Amino acid sequence: MIHGDIPIREKTALEMVREVRSHVPSDIPQAEQTEQISVLDVAGDIASAKLATPHWVDYMTISKSKGEWKILSVVQRIDN
């Protein structure tokens, strides 16, 4: 852990996809199932982006490889 009680977890892309798919359908009301994606910065073939939802925020580092953008890392804040 860093910064007190913030847990650090490592997951592969496949683990992240499986986790998201396992929580569908969501118990979050349809009206709250909104998200806003912001591109924070792009420098050549790397970028940073932010995904904001009513219940969490993800900050992502992204890299372009063979014409496709791939997520390299995600830092997430979950609101309880």
Image (cartoon, helix red, strand yellow):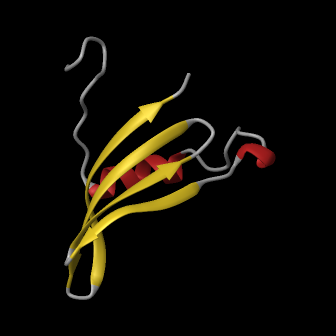
Q: Residue at x 70, y 38 (%)?
A: 27
From the viewer's side, name the closer residue of 14 and 41: 41
Q: Residue at x 38, y 38 (%)?
A: 76
From the viewer's side, name the closer residue of 36 and 22: 36
Q: Which residue is drawn at 25% across and 11% down?
A: 4
Residue 1: image x %, image y %? 20, 19
Residue sticking out furthest to the top: 4
Please give the count of numbered marks on the rendered protein.
0
If the image is split into quadrants, where does the C terminus sit? top right
Query: Is 17 placed left or right of 54 in the picture?
Result: left
Residue 35: image x %, image y %? 61, 53
Query: Is 57 placed left or right of 69 in the picture?
Result: right
Q: Residue at x 20, y 77 (%)?
A: 45
Dividing the picture into quadrants, the one containing residue 70 is: bottom left
Query: 3 above or below 21?
Result: above
Residue 58: image x %, image y %? 42, 46
Query: Is 65 placed left or right of 36 in the picture?
Result: left
Residue sticking out furthest to the bottom: 67
Dividing the picture into quadrants, the one containing residue 69 is: bottom left
Query: 63 above or below 36?
Result: below
Residue 61: image x %, image y %? 26, 57
